[in-house]
Amino acid sequence: MSLYVIILVLFVTGGIAVSIWEWKSIARGRKKAQWPTVKGEIVRSDFAENSLDEFPIIVFSYVVDDEQFEKDLEFPSGNQPSPEYSKKWINKYPVGSSVTVYCEPGHPEAATIEPQQGSDWMVFIIGLLTTGFGMIFILSGL
């Protein structure tokens, strides 16, 4: 087996892995978007206190079955946010604004105001394209 084929097989394998990983992320986001909803309110929306952590601090409160909850908006890991990124989120969710809170059935403490966050169709498509082009090159080279 030539080095060319080995590199292409690794390329295709990477494309498949990225596609599967992102498909699972998209599926999780779709599932969260189907969770029951309640009305909530933004109680904190501010820049991070630590200059090394650029993610904004966004806290929302909501009530489920007469029990009050407060939760931080969780941002996907792996991002390297900028101050502009934080400002965008702070402007989107000012303190006192009303929000729709998606609560996991049976676990009201597990909630989000951004059910699709972290899923990206573009990453999925890039994984598919990588797989497709790699397969074309492998088949045309054999």
Image (spheres, grey):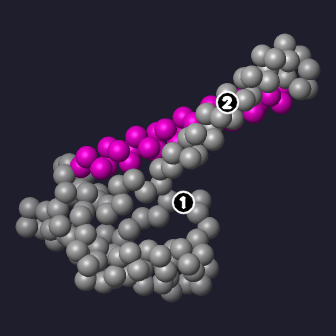
Instruction: Identify the residue position indicated by label 1 in the image.
Output: 77
Question: The C terminus is located in which quarter?
Answer: top right
- Label 1 – label 2 distance at C-alpha: 25 Å
Asked whether 106 or 127 is in front, the reply is 127
Residue 57 coordinates in the image, percent (x, y): 43, 78
Mark 2 element type = helix
Up-down relation of residue 31 to residue 57 (above or below): above
Relative side of 140 to 131, left or right: right
* Quadrant housing residue 11: top right
Residue 51 coordinates in the image, percent (x, y): 59, 84
Asked whether 107 or 56 is in front, the reply is 56
Q: Which residues are magenta?
A: 6-35
Up-down relation of residue 120 to residue 84 (above or below): above
| Mark in front: 1 vs 2 | 2
Mark 1 element type = loop
Instruction: Identify the residue position indicated by label 2 in the image.
Output: 131
Relative side of 132 to 140, left or right: left
Up-down relation of residue 14 to residue 107 (above or below): above
Residue found at x 61% / y 79%: 52
